[in-house]
Image (cartoon, helix red, strand yellow):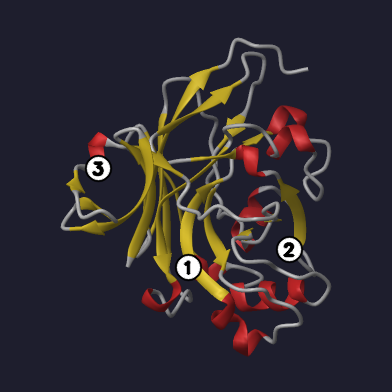
Amino acid sequence: MKHARIAYDGAIHHAVEQDGRLLLDDGRSVSQDAVVWLPPLKPVAQARTILALGLNYADHAKELDFKAPDEPLVFVKGEASLLGHRAFTRRPPEVTFMHYECELAVVIGQAARRVRRDDAHDFVAGYTVANDYAIRDYLENWYRPNLRVKNRDTCTPIGPWLVDAADLPSLASLKLQTTVNGKVTQSGNTGDMIFDVPFLIEYFSSFMTLQPGDLILTGTPDGVVDCQPGDVIVTEIEGIGALQNTIVSWPHPTH
């Protein structure tokens, strides 16, 4: 089942996809164009941990002229970076290279501590699409992206759907694609991940407890290009959905 979290008629609702429309919990059926899309995540009692992978696709590592990592390269993001489908991401005026990253995002469903990879699927609530923008101007080290590169307000669109884990039992070969203004600029496959989802859950849970609602962003394939104000970016993953986002100018200082 495809779940969504939306704002409609002055309130926030849970909804599910039904025949191309949104079925609200109160029984109303509304058009997808009539709502404001929010990140498809339930509110959590504690701070949500967002773990993001760098260089987790061999072709992307090669694109950047890096050796594939021997263990996961991880950075942490704050929840303020998240926004929903059809929302707007701000590009600072002085930057010269800002690019999308189409990523499979894993939503943890129950507390996970010392999980074996064979059991990892039991701890996943579902999957969604993330677009993890990066601003290369601020990059000091590909292996350790600093905060201004990755942890920026409005720079991690996510959604539109949260797909139940039971409805997507295999992640072995899902197609990923990004278009900029309708032109395909990125194409990949989850089968090319260096560290797959079961490995990552086993790895993270070996030294920290993953909590319900935590996110793991699993990296991006090669094919990133600079995005300018006005560009419409669609990041899509087979079986999960197509996430639309638009770049806008940000006139405020960034320093």
Q: CA distance from mark 1 to mark 3?
A: 21 Å
Q: Quadrant of the N terminus?
A: bottom left
Mark 3 is surrounded, within 10 Å at the Cα level, by few (under 14), some (14 to 19) or many (20 or more) other residues, namely some
Q: Earlier in the sequence, mark 2 or mark 3?
A: 3
Distance Cα–Cα, label 2 vs label 3: 40 Å
Q: Position of residue 212 (x, y in %)?
A: 61, 66
Question: Where in the figure is residue 27, as x and y percent of width and height?
Answer: 20, 55
The kind of secondary structure element at disc 3 is helix
Q: Amino acid at mark 3?
A: Gln
Residue 126 numbered mark, or none = 1
Q: Earlier in the sequence, mark 1 or mark 3?
A: 3
Q: CA distance from mark 1 to mark 2?
A: 27 Å
- Residue at image point 66% right, 20% down: 95
Residue 52 picture quarter: bottom right
Q: Position of residue 69 (x, y in %)?
A: 77, 64
Q: Is residue 7 or residue 151 the one in the foreground?
A: 7
Give the secondary structure at mark 2: loop
Looking at the figure, which quarter contains the C terminus?
Answer: top right
At mark 1, the secondary structure is strand
Mark number, residue 68: 2
Mark identifier at residue 32: 3
The numbered mark, 1 or 2, whose residue comes first in the sequence reads: 2
Decide: is 113 above or below 157.
Answer: below
Report the residue at 62% width, 38% height from top.
81
Q: Nearer the viewer, mark 1 or mark 2?
A: 1
Decide if residue 167 is on the left or right side of residue 134. left
Residue at 51% over, 50% down: 130
Which residue type does callout 2 highlight? Ala
